[in-house]
Every structure is written in C-alpha cells, then in structure tokens.
Image: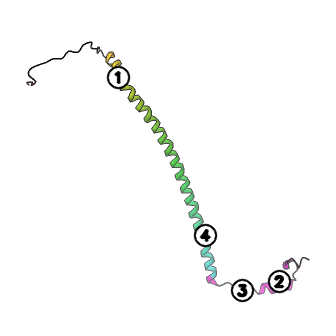
Amino acid sequence: MLKELALPQIFAHSQTKVIRASNLKTVSIGRKVLVIFLVLINVALFFSYILGVNEQASLGYEIKALQSKIAEVSQENKKSNLQIAEKASVTNLEKELLQNGFSVVSTTQYLFTENHLSQR
C-alpha cells in the first residue's frame, strides 16, 4: 500500500539510491552565478525595503511631533489674542487712565481761532 502512495525513498534499495545519485546533472557555472546574483539582488531589495519603511516611520513620528507643537503654539496664540483684546478694550483703557491720574471730562470746550497758521 505504501508503494502506491509514491514513497520510493522508504522502499528503495540501496543500489537504486546509488544509481539515482549517479544520474545527477552538473550545473553550469553561468547558472550558479545567475542564482547567486539573484539572491544578492533579493537581499539588497529586502534591506532597501526595510530602510524605506524605517524612514517612513521616522517621518511619521516627526510629523506627529510637529502637529502637536503646532496645536500648542496655536493655543498660545489664542491666549495672546485674548490678552491683547482685553488690554485694548475701552473699559480697561478707562481704568488705566483713571489710575494714571486722568479725569473724566464732563463738557467739551472747543477753541476757535481766526488764524489757522502758527509761527515758530
């Protein structure tokens, strides 16, 4: 039954093995060089692929760090704009003027002159 399963290496006689081993063809040098060349190309392509993936991963981490820095700077920019708006508001300016000794004017007086020119 095992012979029908095509397992000749189990049931082969020692003489048959010798005959099969003696019928091996020799491989030409050109074919050996071609195989070695293809293996070296595959190894080089594998390493270049690994380096490329590593480079892309590094760039991804740098982009993520820069995006978080942009978000942080944007938040600081919003806070600065809010502080500028508070400092430039009319109520804040009035408070600062009153603290510096200025007073509120109740009536406005205009000076009219006939000569609009001035001398040095």
For marks 1 and 3, give the one nearer the viewer: 1
Comes first in the chain, label 1 or label 2: 2
In the rendering, at what x and y percent does residue 89 appear?
Answer: 36, 25
Depth check, front residue: 104 or 112:
112
Instruction: Using residue 114 as the reference point, say whether residue 20 is left or right of it.
Output: right
Asked which secondary structure carries label 4, the reply is helix
Is 119 within the magenta? no
How far apart in space, not on screen, are marks 1 and 2 (Cα)?
Answer: 105 Å
Residue that mark 2 sits on: 17
What is the distance, in whole Å, between disc 1 and disc 3 at their CAs?
Answer: 100 Å
- Specify the segment rendered in magenta: 1-30
**Residue at label 3?**
25
Disc 1 secondary structure class:
helix
Circle 1 sits on which residue? Answer: 90
Q: How is the image coloured?
A: rainbow
Are the residues at dot 1 and dot 4 in contact (C-beta closer than 8 Å)? no
Q: Amino acid at mark 1?
A: Val
Mark 3 closeness class: few <14, some 14–19, many ≥20 residues within 10 Å: few
Q: What residue is disc 4 on?
A: 42
Q: Earlier in the sequence, mark 1 or mark 4?
A: 4
Provide the secondary structure element on which disc 2 rests. Answer: helix
Mark 2 is surrounded, within 10 Å at the Cα level, by few (under 14), some (14 to 19) or many (20 or more) other residues, namely few
Which amino acid does the dot numbered 2 rest on?
Answer: Lys
Residue type at tag 4: Asn
Of the 4 image quadrants, the one containing the C terminus is top left
Contact, CB < 8 Å: mark 1 with mark 3?
Answer: no
